[in-house]
Amino acid sequence: MASATDHTTLGKQTALPQSPEEAVLDRVPNPHPDTLYVARFTAPEFTSLCPVTGQPDFAHLVIDYVPGDWLVESKSLKLYLGAFRNHGAFHEDCTIAIAKRLVELLAPKYLRIGGYWYPRGGIPIDVFWQTGPCPDGVWLPDQGVAPYRGRG
């Protein structure tokens, strides 16, 4: 795990990692560790591959977390998420693996992820996970992704 001073991507031209396992997530010190607040990352064009067919799968990911001592460095997060582009895994695996990797790196006070997967074969799959209850007094807005509505 990279330390706060070992940034692997910040300020450098960086190639997309070949896999999520090879991707390095960087963290930086939280300038307000004494304040409860939510940081949100939205990835409306997340892509991975179906592990059975090799066909692309698309999702709209929303990651909310209440930082402790660390923040995720955004460029390294973008590269990590981009590394799934050639990675074969089911929707549930991708969504939960991303959340667990962030929890391991950051030790946040709270984290939740919503994986809103676009339909393949006529069925959308949405995957949700959180570390526990959101701390009292934190404003946690709705993730803002409309539920899928097919033609009917």
Image: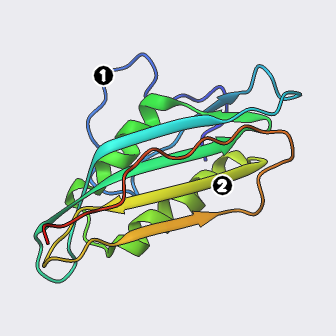
Along the viewing direction, whichever of 142 and 15 lies nearer the viewer:
142
- What residue is shown at x 41% (from left), y 74% (from top)? 92
- What residue is shown at x 38% (from left), y 56% (from top)? 20
Mark 2, residues whose alpha carbon is within 10 Å: few (<14), some, or many (≥20)? some
Residue 147 appears anywhere in the view: yes
Residue 53: % across, % down: 11, 80
Q: Is residue 5 above or below residue 106?
A: above
Residue 32: % across, % down: 80, 22
Instruction: Name, please, the residue furthest toward the front.
Output: 152
Q: Quadrant of residue 31?
A: top right
Q: Which amino acid, by three-letter code, is at mark 2?
A: Val
Q: Earlier in the sequence, mark 2 or mark 1?
A: 1
Mark 1, residues whose alpha carbon is within 10 Å: few (<14), some, or many (≥20)? few
Residue 132: % across, % down: 75, 63
Q: Is residue 149 above or below residue 139?
A: below
- What residue is shown at x 37% (from left), y 52% (from top)? 146
Q: Is residue 111 above or below residue 28?
A: below
How far apart, in angstroms, are the residues tagged by discs 2 and 1?
Answer: 26 Å
Q: Are marks 2 and 1 in contact (CB under 8 Å)?
A: no
Q: Secondary structure at mark 1?
A: loop
Residue 8 appears anywhere in the view: no
Q: Quadrant of residue 49?
A: bottom left
Q: Secondary structure at mark 2?
A: helix
Q: Which amino acid, by three-letter code, is at mark 1?
A: Gln
Task: Give the residue pinned by disc 1.
Answer: 13
Task: Give the residue pinned by disc 2.
Answer: 103
Along the viewing direction, whichever of 7 and 66 lies nearer the viewer:
66
- What residue is shown at x 59% (from left), y 44% (from top)? 64
Residue 152's disc is: none
The number of callouts visible is: 2
Indicate the quadrant containing the C terminus: top left, top right, bottom left or bottom right. bottom left
